Amino acid sequence: MKRRQLIGYVGTGLVTAVATNIVSYLPANAQSSGVSVQWLGHTCFLFTSGGTKILVNPFRTVGCTAKYRPPKVNADLVLISSQLLDEGAVDGLPGNPKLVYEPGVYEFKGIKLQGISIDHDRKGGKQFGKNIAWKWQQGGVNFLHLGGAAAPISIEQKILMGRPDVLLIPVGGSGKAYNAEEAKQAIAVLNPKLIIPTHYRTQAADPAACDIAPLDEFLNIMSGTGIQRSNVDNVVLSPKNLPEKATIQVLSYKF
């Protein structure tokens, strides 16, 4: 099957993305040995397995992300959910990673990815436009990163998203992302094994310029769901260590 290959280079900016064939298959064992998931703050994560690094939603340090370290890390592929500053700031990333920022089906080094469009606000996208949820399998684990989704998941979107092993979901609210109750509803629709909350207030926030809620609001409303807390910013996941029953994984950011 021929897949869409609209891939840009970070160095060329978002406007001048080019179509390029970058399919390069990895050995099967490189795709089944697990994946390291590192939280870099807000909705930004680095996924590493088989020598391939995927960076999702690098941000600019302002407002709710003011005191995080700039997520300028080496990556092979960068996925962004929108061109807003808290999830689409690609200037200054090291190296020359590939960049994907539009919905569609892609393939990169044997990893199949899909970008699924969902409204970025509760007004049909009229306020903040569209958000892209990213779905892919890496290290034998099915990931779904919802970016800054704020709209309910439709039947059509649910079909495309499937049932993720690991769901990364915004929980802090504001005009452009789920609040705790909306996140709970989306989790019920998607039925993931592991839930990693994103987009919530931490001590990184500028108090005068951040309108998102802390994590506790989400954890309180998810009472009855198991919680795993880590004192580090990363977790290594594989098909063998995923929980049988839905569990929330909380990672720590070291300031």
Image: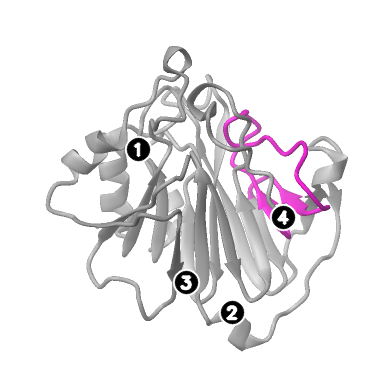
Q: Does residue 160 show up?
A: no
Marks 2 and 3 in Cβ contact (< 8 Å) = no
Residue 207 % position (x, y): 42, 17
Marks 2 and 4, the one that precedes in the sequence? 2
Marks 1 and 2 in Cβ contact (< 8 Å) = no
Mark 3, mark 4: which one is toward the viewer? 4
On screen, residue 191 versus residue 67, left or right, reads left
Q: Is residue 76 magenta?
A: yes
- Specify few, some or many for label 1: CA neighbours under 10 Å numbering under 14, 14-19, or 20 or more: many
Q: How is the image coloured?
A: one colour
Comparing 235 with 136, the one in front is: 235
- Which numbered circle lies on residue 171? 1
Find the magenta span and give its range.
74-103
Marks 2 and 4 in Cβ contact (< 8 Å) = no
- Specify few, some or many for label 3: CA neighbours under 10 Å numbering under 14, 14-19, or 20 or more: many
- Which numbered circle lies on residue 31? 2
Real-space CA distance between mark 2 and mark 3, rounded to the nearest whole angstrom: 9 Å
Real-space CA distance between mark 1 and mark 2, rounded to the nearest whole angstrom: 30 Å
Q: Amino acid at mark 1?
A: Val
Q: Which residue is mark 4?
A: 74
